[in-house]
Image (cartoon, grey):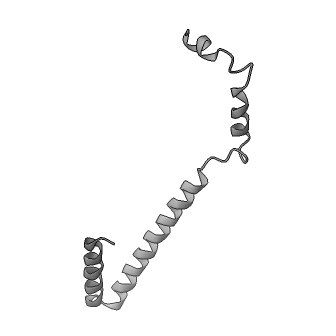
């Protein structure tokens, strides 16, 4: 951990000790919310990873590299 992070944690701990119990519970709720939000984002990113075996369109894309689909495609598209 960075030194700033450790200092931040120490400052948070000191601040928590000064709060009434109901406010400490609010802080805990907020921490849990941030953890949930981070987990939810990770799950969303994980679900977006492309899996050719699970996606029929991705399976077909590889087939387009073979003849006759790929034959002289650059010349046809770009005039090269």
Residue 7 falls left or right of residue 62: left
Image quadrant of residue 7? bottom left
Q: Residue at x 47, y 65 (%)?
A: 37
How many callouts does the rendering have? 0
Q: Is residue 54 above or below residue 28?
A: above
Residue 35 falls left or right of residue 49: left
Q: Residue 62 appears at what percent x and percent y?
A: 70, 33
Q: Residue 39 appears at what percent x and percent y?
A: 51, 66
Q: Residue at x 30, y 90 (%)?
A: 20
Image quadrant of residue 60? top right
Image quadrant of residue 56? top right
Q: Residue at x 34, y 84 (%)?
A: 23
Q: Is residue 39 above or below residue 54?
A: below
Image quarter where the N terminus lies is bottom left
- Front residue of this view, candidates 74 and 20: 74
> As drawn, which residue projects farthest toward the top?
79
Q: Is residue 48 above or below residue 40?
A: above
- Front residue of this view, candidates 4 and 29: 4
Q: Is residue 6 above or below residue 70?
A: below
Q: Residue at x 72, y 48 (%)?
A: 54
Image quarter where the C terminus lies is top right
Q: Residue 74 appears at what percent x and percent y?
A: 59, 16
Residue 18 falls left or right of residue 46: left
């Amino acid at each position: 951990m960075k030194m700033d992070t450790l200092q931040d944690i120490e400052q948070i701990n000191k601040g928590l000790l000064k709060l009434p119990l109901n406010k400490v519970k609010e802080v805990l709720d907020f921490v849990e919310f941030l953890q949930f939000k981070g987990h939810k984002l990770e799950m969303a990113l994980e679900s977006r990873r492309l899996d050719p075996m699970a996606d029929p369109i991705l399976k077909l894309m590889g087939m387009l590299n073979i003849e006759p689909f790929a034959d002289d495609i650059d010349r046809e598209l770009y005039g090269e």
